[in-house]
Image: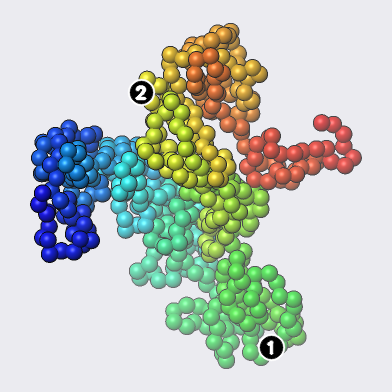
Amino acid sequence: MRSCLSSTWGAALAVVLAWLYHCPAEAYTCIATTAPTHYATDCPAGSTCSPISCATGSFPSPSYMTPYASCNADGASWTYHYCDIACIATSAPTGYVGDCAAGQSCTGISCASGYYPFPYWASASTHCSQTAGDPFTYQYCGLGCAATPAPLGYVGDCPAGQDTCTAVTCASGFYNLNPSYAAPQARCHNMNSDYLPGDAYEYINCVASCTTFDCPSSLNLVKRSGTVYCATATCTYAECCTAAASLSCTQPSLPAGYVDFVSTTCATGYHGTALAVCASNGGTLQLFGCTVNQCYFPPSAAAPGYSPGPSCSSTGALTSECPGTQCASGYHGTPVLTCPFTYPGAYRLSGCTANQCTLSTIPSLYTARSGSCSSLTTVEDCQPRLSCAAGAVGTPTLQCTTNGGTFTLSGCTDPALTCTLPNPLTTGYSYRGSGCAGQLLPASCTGLSCATGYTGSVTLSCASSGATFTLSGCNANTCTLPSPITTGYTATSCSGQITAASCSVSCDSGYTGT
């Protein structure tokens, strides 16, 4: 045998360099080897086998590696390296146009109608990770802004699903701040780093003239830098109305929304410019200009994993708080909502994380790529790696109801296996018919539907002949309690979007019934 690398290299270094340069430390005589799956080159008997090519539909993985074959002992078979299927075929998710075929790259992707590049400088694209068998990741398309009514000072409502809204003018009593180069407009904050898809438009470039506000008679109209303010001759003022220097007022209790009686900054959760007015000597100092922030619950496409409380919704209703918000099914944690904006937008949500489960044992009707779901992972990560086994039909469906638990797998069935309906029928399902008695093929049993209070599509799975069908696909409806709750009733553990079974309702004191 001869050394692949110079004998002057140290033994340990030779091993490292041999791996880097795809060369065994010793040149062994190997047996002829047929190319395995993902490879196109058979290796002959001998001490060399190169170059190695990936089969059609397979690619170098990771993409920066060069495929090669190695043999580590006389009489051994060649071992092949670095060809795999790369990313699997992936259907375009919501917000995108363009499916991806299996491979390393996928081009020709665009944003669907009503969706726009997010951030604004990006273009719709896909990314294939270095883990073989992953789906393509679609990126850089977001929802346009939500329908937004014109705020104070503006005329012109803006429809949903656009990136700009130009049919905007200043209302009576307001004027264009910079008429020479900045027309009144409403912009969708695609260009803003804190923009969340589905936010409201931000209206800009209209400001109030001084007469819009009721300035005290002790204050005079002045004009500084092209903008009209209320002021006295002896003071400098930042906004329309403020206290005259010659007047003295008593301070009341500090109202909500204000930091103190001097600062022009509003308290956290409020927006505007804090203004103090002393209208008459010896009177009470008045504070105005700070308004509580209002937000709406974002659509599920923009913030999955959250279920809104009963006082807010995903239909665009503006609220200053949203008590009772919970993590949605399949998520865990404590939801945190913030509403930090000076214009109506979506609540910023945090605290809820997708559950992670394991799938250590794969039932015979399913197949999964090696190791793909054996450690803790999410439904989103595991689902694309599963498929029905040869001869089985259906679509694999995963559920991870408890963080750290085991995935529940359903959806694939052997069309040749026969099962019986469970008796009593699984909760959430209804059967109206006469053709499902005894041992049946899944396709032979019709008349099943979701029971009242449940929605979905019924799927039958038969794991082995003579067993009982597993029913899946129907989920309990979720609703919110009326706010305030109907007179005569009291409820516990019923906040947010919940199922009827998880909400405990009873008659209030002074009422009877069930």
x, y percent for residue 111: 34, 45
Asked whether residue 156 appears in the rendered view, the answer is no
Q: Is residue 243 above or below residue 382?
A: below
x, y percent for residue 337: 58, 57
Q: Nearer the viewer, residue 12 or 142?
A: 12
Q: Residue furthest right?
A: 510
Tell me which amino acid carries mark 2: Ala
- Residue drawn at (59%, 52%), measured in percent from left and top? 333
Residue 431: quadrant of the picture: top right
Asked whether residue 223 appears in the rendered view, the answer is yes
x, y percent for residue 130: 30, 49
Q: Are marks 1 and 2 in contact (CB under 8 Å)?
A: no
The residue carrying pointer 1 sits among few (fewer than 14), some (14 to 19) or many (20 or more) residues within 10 Å by Cα, namely some
Residue hosting label 1: 247
Tell me which amino acid carries mark 1: Leu
Q: Which label is found at residue 390?
A: 2
